[in-house]
Image: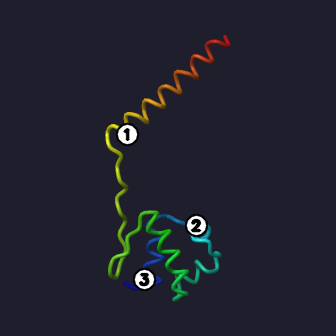
Amino acid sequence: MEISPEQIRAARTLLRLEQAELGKRAGVSVVTVRRLGRERVAPRILAKACAVLEQAGAEFIPDGIHRRRPERPDAATLYEDLRAVSLRSAARMLKQQSKI
């Protein structure tokens, strides 16, 4: 599928990704990113930019753009993350109490 400059602009807007940030992530200049949104560019540059946008959550569809929903972690992962936060918090509180 051929990606149009309009789709690139729409993807950046949808993801709220500034030109400078897209350029940084894709390893191209801001001037090149501006060109991406106005005209056709070299295929390898377009591929880099599209990869960055897709990694950020954009999905290119025929004649448009779609935002993929982020994957939600399972309950066990959430539990472990919350447990780790609570253990760090408890350790910090104990450390502060020992200084008093």
Q: Position of residue 79 (x, y in %)?
A: 37, 34
Q: Which mark is residue 77?
A: 1
Q: Which residue lies at the image location 35% right of the left edge and 53% below the top edge?
A: 71
Q: Position of residue 70 (x, y in %)?
A: 37, 56
Does the residue at mark 1 contact the one at mark 2 (Cβ under 8 Å)? no
Q: Which residue lies at the image location 52% right of the left edge and 21% below the top edge?
A: 90
Q: Position of residue 92 (x, y in %)?
A: 58, 23
Q: Which mark is residue 3?
A: 3
Q: In front: 14, or 90? A: 90
- Identify the secondary structure beneath mark 2: helix
- What is the spatial separation of the Cα atoms under label 3 and label 2, in whole angstroms? 19 Å
Q: Amino acid at mark 3?
A: Ile
- Sequence-wise, the earlier of marks 3 and 2 is 3
Q: Which residue lies at the image location 56% right of the left edge and 67% below the top edge?
A: 18
Residue found at the very far right of the displayed protein: 99
Q: Which mark is residue 25?
A: 2
Q: Amino acid at mark 1?
A: Thr
- Sequence-wise, the earlier of marks 1 and 2 is 2
The colour scheme applied to this rendered structure is rainbow
